[in-house]
Amino acid sequence: MRIGFIGLGGMGKGMAGNLIKAGHEVLVWNRSQQAVQEMVSQGAKAASEPADAFDAEVVVSMLADDASTRAVILDSGALDRARAGAIHLSMATLSVAFVAELIERHAKAGVDYISAPVFGRTDVAVAGKLNIVVAGPQAAVDKVQPLLDAMGQTTWPLGEDPLRANIVKIAGNFMLASAIETMGEASALTKSYGVEPADLLNILTNTLFAAPAYKNYGAMIAEQRFEPAAFKLTLGLKDVGLALSAGQAKNVPLPFGSVLRDNLLEAVAQGEGHLDWSALGGRALKRSGQA
């Protein structure tokens, strides 16, 4: 299959690499040419502009946020120049308001729009073990299923409304941020009584909270290992903001979301935005004067 791939950050490179390994013709575009050349060395072809990537059966985009997606997909005119009958597989974490706009714009352009945000960090993307939440026109989803299989270990279908996939991704990241914050606060509490965070988190992530998210982030918090960042703290702030905006649109209060936003904002204000978002779990130790 001829695939355009837009966005070669830490996640995108691993995902595009797995599509190449699966034998697809992959045409890549990215602002940074270094990332493009890395993919070309693996067998991809370089696109000179985003519109070139839309000359494909399926276009996969993995961009950082609403603003970058708007600039690259809409403002550049790329969508308007899409091949007839193309499918756009959008795998980024975007706001529900912007996704609603994208759905409308794609319908006018005659391009099927599928939301397929992912759960998993950069190492998981490279391994092709992502969990992918997908929603969009069923015929289009069926066509891209081999691509989803190449990039992920499990696809979780949520019907034909793309907004459903995006809200599940936003809710999932909200839950992850909540877990990171509570592990940090619990660690600060026990440390004040002489129990090291590593001991607390070793016990709890092997008993009550024996799940990958708690184990992985718990180890990072215990070791204060926040670099290199697989998911920057600034992106966590963005995603919690998306949850609050989505809640406000439906009159759904998210009281703890406001706490998370302020704590993440505090971290960014103190120069920690470049760290992995697990650094949120270190804020409680600092606020309590123990770090």
Image (spheres, rainbow, N blue to C red):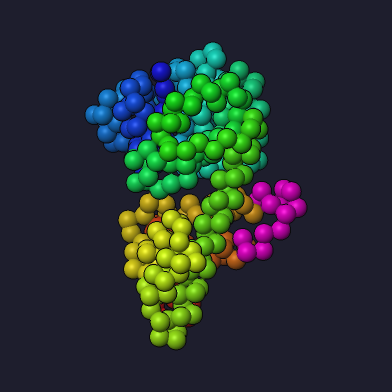
In the image, 2: left or right of 262? left
Residue 140 % position (x, y): 56, 22
The answer to whether residue 256 is above or below residue 108 is below
Q: Residue at x 40, y 59 (%)?
A: 216
Q: Residue furthest front?
A: 207
- Is residue 249 rendered magenta in the image? yes
The answer to whether residue 247 is above or below residue 1 is below
Residue 266 % position (x, y): 51, 66
In the image, 92: left or right of 48? right
Total residue callouts: 0
Position of the C terminus by quadrant = bottom left
In the image, 74: left or right of 104? left
Position of the N terminus by quadrant = top left
Q: Residue furthest right?
A: 251
Q: Main secondary structure of the magenta part?
A: helix
Q: Residue at x 66, y 48 (%)?
A: 246
The answer to whether residue 244 is above or below residue 91 is below
Point out the stretch of residues depicted in magenta. Answer: 245-257
Q: Residue at x 40, y 18 (%)?
A: 2
Foreground residue among 219 and 94: 219
Q: Residue furthest top?
A: 84
Residue 199 appears in which quarter of the rendering? bottom left
Foreground residue among 103 and 78: 103
- Is residue 231 rendered magenta in the image? no
**Residue 266 in sight from this viewpoint:** no
In the image, 188: left or right of 105? left
Residue 145 % position (x, y): 48, 27
Q: Residue at x 52, y 59 (%)?
A: 177
The answer to whether residue 256 is above or below residue 160 is below
